Amino acid sequence: MTLMTGMTLITGMTLITGHRGARNLWPENSLAGFRNTLELGVDAIEFDVHLTEPGELVVIHDATLERTTDGFGPVRKLTPQVRAGVKLKGTDEPIPTLADVLAVLSSRDGPGLHVETKIDETGTPYPDIARRVAEALRRFGVEDRTHLTSFDISVLEDCRRHAPEVARLVSVNADWAERQGGLAAFLARVDGLVDIVAIHHELMEAQWELVRAALPLDRLCVWTLNEEATIRHWLERRIGRLTSDRPDLAIALRSAMMTAAPLEANPA
């Protein structure tokens, strides 16, 4: 992996992604959280998108409202009027729309975006969500620094169909891999479909030899790391990308490690 930062060429540097903004620092998927996360200097920001029945693209992780808002019920049932009155816990903010979030994150020199297209509370993909999200990315001019992401292969195939120019990322943990017939079978299925494979850190550790035989470091992302020891472990392995609820900690550790021992080529 090679990254140009200003006039310095850095090889082998792990890119840091703020998970749902930086949800251990600020309310997840909130505009205030996204603004604050930008100030940390992350390489990418991850967030989640659902589609309501009236046609709004809204940024929230769960398919239901109870955990992160003062509302209740399925996200897909939200009308614009009800959404405006539902507040994110710990804030005076309503659930933001995708347009609200992209307005905050679409500055010319902004970070990469990992936009997860979610499924509804029944486990069903939203019809036409990939096309609608792609249109919004193009409208804000961020399609060239975005990864469309999902656990669901059918959703990513839809993303490829409607937005072939936008990069794609697939996520997998142990439970999901088992449902797909094992990690090796899953990786074979997504070969050619995605640019990045994001693997939960416990599964990545358990299947490290298999993973490294299948993919180079710069196509791998490990998630979600929030403790110093585990962050340091994966930085030392020079994993391509690292997703964290504490991107401030990850960035600080990366900076300290680079100062102590400048990175050279990726290890084999």
Image: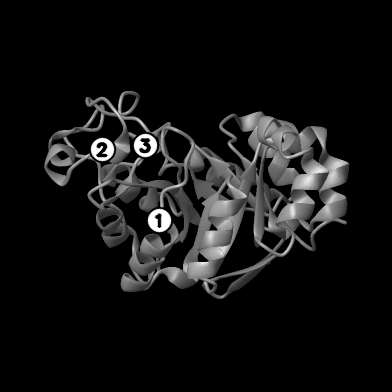
For the C terminus, which image quadrant?
A: bottom right
Q: Amino acid at mark 1?
A: Ile
**What is the secondary structure assignment of the residue under circle 1?**
helix
| Camera-side residue of 29 and 18 | 29
| Residue 1 position by quadrant | bottom right
Give the colour scheme shown.
one colour
The spot of residue 170 in percent (x, y) is 62, 51
Q: Is residue 60 visible?
A: yes
Q: Viewed as shown, does residue 19 lie left or right of 218?
A: left
Q: According to the image, label 1 marks what residue?
A: 129
Q: Amino acid at mark 2?
A: Lys
Neighbor class of circle 2 (other Cα within 10 Å; few <14, some 14-19, many 20+) is some
Q: According to the image, label 3 marks what residue?
A: 28
Which residue does the image show at 44% across and 59% down from the upper left?
Answer: 130
Q: Amino acid at mark 3?
A: Glu
The alpha-carbon separation of the residues under discs 3 and 2 comes to 21 Å
Image mark for residue 77: 2
The alpha-carbon separation of the residues under discs 3 and 1 comes to 21 Å
Q: Is residue 262 visible?
A: no
The spot of residue 222 in percent (x, y) is 65, 43
Of badges 3 and 2, nearer the viewer stands 2
For marks 3 and 2 on the same chain, the one whose residue lies earlier in the sequence: 3
The spot of residue 244 in percent (x, y) is 53, 39
